[in-house]
Image: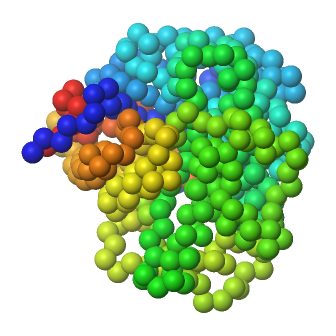
């Protein structure tokens, strides 16, 4: 049977500025650049954020190719370090403005609806060094100035905006588990303060957007790795519940309902790691809620009750332990579990928890090493695994929509192969291949497949 998606459903893809533009033009250093500079030996193929996929020069061609792949909605980010000339005042840089203007125009020319995101892990390094990054309330205010400038420059031309991509990764990677700049571990108190400031920064950006009286919509993109408990026993279920509260419901509750989950706040207070807030924040968070949410879904989390607390600093996993589900399928390149059904479960959770808020899948995809292995005699990457991956996820998403989930689109990660602060170009995600030796683009089989899905607004 043919699975038809709702009329007007967005078939699209995502990327981000720092992962695709390169350093051409003018921009300040951000923490991804710094991370790469200081951790280069951990990267596999030596391609840095300076090169990436050269979207800065090639966006015209790239939009044409995206159109060929059926992409009619595309998310990228405006880089704080490119748009802004003076972080303290939020004054824009003329070259930055000119670049984004021509990029926006090129998207329009190809009939592609842009979603512009403001923060994709790319804090200006100088704000980190001077003020301590997201730990500082002053930086939160500077972010609101950047947001205001972005809306003033492009708010009439771009109808969809998001404040942050995956804010939890900043907390988790930077302060709790050390896999992203500044690479700290077990700094729970500081991580929780950062979490709070990210929520506040998002709300302040929403406030700026509304103040300008713009006609579009503004949202937030959250990575959801839903927790499944090992058993139905109470202890295991509590573990899963805590995981979800901390890792994604924190952000969604506060930006959609205007307040944090009470149970989470109680636990953080009891553990002595609750954030510092100002009295006026409560009203600000309540007043500046988002219009829509973006959900990035890649894989689930399997948890059980923890045995005992062994950590030195505060970590959320004092309330859950990871567990290896014996039936799991994995993507060997990334060691991430493949579990398409979770997309249905997430969709139904969105319907129950936030019935009035429309949302879309803002990232979903599979990163694979050495796709050269799959090049066919015609020279095209025959990524049947990627097509199968999307088909399975879309089947579950379709089911959820049938059952009333208010999901208005699907964005693949990524439109083109692009750079990652984790693995450079080792894992390829694109529907369109990028040859790093000469930046040549070639459609993969998945791109041709996606075009068909998009044209028919559904799949078999
Ligand atoms: C998400 C990010 C993207 C992208 C993707 C793939 O978390 O929003 O920026 O990088 O994951 O992850 P990776 O490139 O590390 O395999």
Q: Looking at the image, is 201 positioned above or below residue 272?
A: above
Percent across and percent down for residue 441 are 36, 29
Q: Is residue 372 visible?
A: no
Does 213 sit left or right of 67 as displayed? right
Q: Is residue 435 left or right of residue 87?
A: left
- How are the residues colored? rainbow
Q: Does residue 392 appear to the left or right of 17 in the view shown?
A: left
| Image quadrant assignment for residue 56 | top right
Q: Residue at x 48, y 67 (%)?
A: 227
Residue found at x 55% / y 42%: 221
The residue lying at 28 percent from left, 33 percent from top is 6
State the residue lying farthest toward the bottom: 307
In the image, residue 85 lies at what x, y percent? 79, 20
* Left or right: 16 in relation to 315: left
Q: Is residue 146 above or below residue 224?
A: above
In the rendered view of the protein, which quadrant contains the C terminus? top left
Q: Quadrant of residue 288?
A: top right
- From the top left corner, tell me how far across and down residue 248 is, in percent: 58, 56
Q: Which quadrant of the figure contains the N terminus?
A: top left
Residue 225 location in percent, x, y?
49, 60
Can residue 90 be seen from the camera position used here? yes
Numbered marks: total: 0
Q: Residue at x 59, y 12 (%)?
A: 156
Question: Which is more toward the observer, 224 or 44?
Answer: 224
State the residue lying farthest toward the left. 1
């Amino acid at each position: 049977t043919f699975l038809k998606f709702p009329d007007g459903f967005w078939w699209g893809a995502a990327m981000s500025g720092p992962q695709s533009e390169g350093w051409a033009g003018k921009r300040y250093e951000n923490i991804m650049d710094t991370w790469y500079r200081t951790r280069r030996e951990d990267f596999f193929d030596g391609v840095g954020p300076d090169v990436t996929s050269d979207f800065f020069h090639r966006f015209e061609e790239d939009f044409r190719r995206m159109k060929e792949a059926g992409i009619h909605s595309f998310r990228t980010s405006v880089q704080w370090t490119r748009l802004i000339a003076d972080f303290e005042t939020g004054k824009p840089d003329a070259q930055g403005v000119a670049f984004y203007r021509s990029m926006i125009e090129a998207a329009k020319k190809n009939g592609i609806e842009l979603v512009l995101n403001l923060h994709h892990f790319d804090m200006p390094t100088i704000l980190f060094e001077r003020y301590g990054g997201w730990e500082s309330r002053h930086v939160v205010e500077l972010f609101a100035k950047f947001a205001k400038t972005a809306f003033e420059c492009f708010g009439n031309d771009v109808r969809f905006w998001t404040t942050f991509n995956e804010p939890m990764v900043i907390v988790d990677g930077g302060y709790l588990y050390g896999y992203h700049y500044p690479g700290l571990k077990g700094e729970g108190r500081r991580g929780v303060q950062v979490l709070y400031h990210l929520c506040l920064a998002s709300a302040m950006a929403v406030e700026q957007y509304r103040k300008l009286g713009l006609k579009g919509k503004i949202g937030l993109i959250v990575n959801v790795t839903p927790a499944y408990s090992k058993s139905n026993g109470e202890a295991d279920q509590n573990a899963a519940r805590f995981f979800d509260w901390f890792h994604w419901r924190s952000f969604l509750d506060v930006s959609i309902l205007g307040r944090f989950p009470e149970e989470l706040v109680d636990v953080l207070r009891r553990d002595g790691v609750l954030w510092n807030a100002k009295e006026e924040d409560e009203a600000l968070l309540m007043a500046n809620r988002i219009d829509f949410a973006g959900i990035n879904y890649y894989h689930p989390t399997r948890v059980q009750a923890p045995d005992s607390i062994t950590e030195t600093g505060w970590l959320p996993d004092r309330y859950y332990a990871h567990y290896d589900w014996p039936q799991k399928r994995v993507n060997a390149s990334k060691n991430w579990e493949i579990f398409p059904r979770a997309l249905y479960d997430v969709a139904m959770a969105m319907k129950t928890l936030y019935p009035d808020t429309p949302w879309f899948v803002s990232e979903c995809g599979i990163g694979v090493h050495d796709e050269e292995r799959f090049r066919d005699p015609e020279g095209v990457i025959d990524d049947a695994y990627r097509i199968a991956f999307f088909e399975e996820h879309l089947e579950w998403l379709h089911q959820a929509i049938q059952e009333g989930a208010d999901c208005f689109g699907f964005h693949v990660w990524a439109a083109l192969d692009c750079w990652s602060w984790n693995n450079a170009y080792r894992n390829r995600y694109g529907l369109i291949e990028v040859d790093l030796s000469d930046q040549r683009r070639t459609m993969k089989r998945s791109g041709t497949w996606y075009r068909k899905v998009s044209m028919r607004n559904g799949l078999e």
